[in-house]
Amino acid sequence: MKETGALRGITVLDLSRLLPGPYASMILADHGARVICLEDQRFAAEAFADNTVNRGKEHMSLNLKSDRGKKIFFQLVQSADVVLEGFRPGVTARLGVDYETVKSLNPKIVYCSITGYGQSGPYSGLVGHDANYLSVAGVLDINGEAGGRPLIPGIQIADMAGGGMNAVIGIMLALYSRETSGQGQYIDISMTDGSLSLMSLALTLQQAAGGPLRRGDSLLSHHYAFYNTYETADGRYLSIGALEHRFWKNLCEFFEVPEYIPLQYDENWREEILEFFRRQFKSRPLAHWKEVLAHRDICWAPVQNLSDALEDPNFSHREMVVELSGKDGRRLTALGASVKLSDTPPRVEGMPPDFGADTRAILRELGYEEAAIESLVQEGAV
């Protein structure tokens, strides 16, 4: 049992694979939960290896299509707090490990399902990936250059924010509710629902504009000079977010164009002002702008790539870049825990386990002797 973290004493059985579920259970593990990943041997060839979202977890190979494998799952369920799964709707029922079945064994269980389109609705049976969920939710339509095609973001927003983060929120809410009710409950997480929920400000802007947002050409997406990206002389970029008038005033005064201060939202002057700032920023390399803008109250930032971010002293100070070490000498750079708690801080530790690395240890914990374990292995139950 983990000795620190807000979730110490909580046990999570993670049946999910790929990104959304494992990302959610990583957050739970960072905050002290014991996370046991359960995965069929047929996926061993696709093992996550050094996938950092599986740090700090245990991994057990388990065949839920086997009667003996299912029996082991039910043994684990009786002392678990959370079950997390990412199968298509209906799969857990066919396997006989659905919420109603698990609840009959452990009424306090919190059971969370993450799917693309949810457990119900006309799209529930459809397959999909991040780009598809963002497409349906309207997110993709507003990403990209004005007049161009929709661009797929470089990170998995639907998977991680729409799915993984919402799963963590749901699990926390259900665990809190259990404190007073004594009962667990079922959580239905749709990555598409989660993606649509991120569109709240976009909806407000659309309602204010009286029509659809235009791709790459709205209040907070390249329409005005004060909220834009600019190329520098060396082919790098920086962002300006001088949304509030005081920041816009500071920007204009720095570039000695006070006449632009009252024209922040003026459509007649918009293109001229944009071209002015494009020329200005293109005239010097990014290093120059870093130096002269370093302490200016403007809301600006260099556009960094991932390597830049990993070496950024701010992230180092915030413990957002950490080094994991294995007993075999392996080292792995990982991203830290973004939720900081004063009294129960998260701990990012433990290399991602090899596939099935903890199978035997967990079986021994359940009371299985070596001969029985060998029998389970030979039968393919684990």
Image (cartoon, helix red, strand yellow):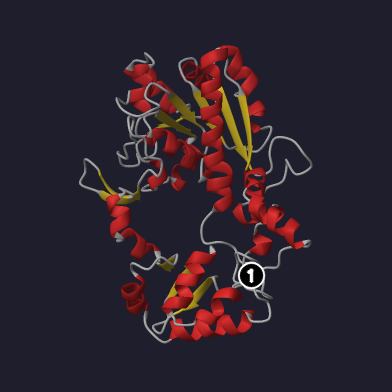
**Seen in the image, is 322 located left or right of residue 199?**
left
Quarter of the image where the C terminus is located: top left
- The residue positioned 62% from the left and 52% from the top of the image is 129
Is residue 141 visible in the rendered structure shown here?
A: yes
Relative depth, front residue between 76 and 315: 315
Residue 87 placed where, x, y %? 61, 37
Q: Quadrant of residue 215?
A: bottom right
Residue 20 placed where, x, y %? 53, 43
Label tally: 1
Q: Is residue 153 above or below residue 191?
A: below
Relative depth, front residue between 306 and 88: 306
Give the residue type at disc 1: Gly
Q: Is residue 124 above or below residue 317?
A: above
Relative depth, front residue between 358 and 350: 350
Quarter of the image where the N terminus is located: top left
Secondary element at tag 1: loop
Q: Is residue 23 above or below residue 5?
A: below
Residue labelled with disc 1? 216
Query: Counting other residues with Cα less than 10 Å from the Cα at mark 1, is it few (<14), some (14-19), or many (20 or more)?
Result: many
Residue 321 placed where, x, y %? 31, 51
- The residue positioned 51% from the left and 29% from the top of the image is 172
- The residue positioned 61% from the left and 13% from the top of the image is 104
Is residue 138 visible in the rendered structure shown here?
A: no
Residue 92 placed where, x, y %? 63, 29
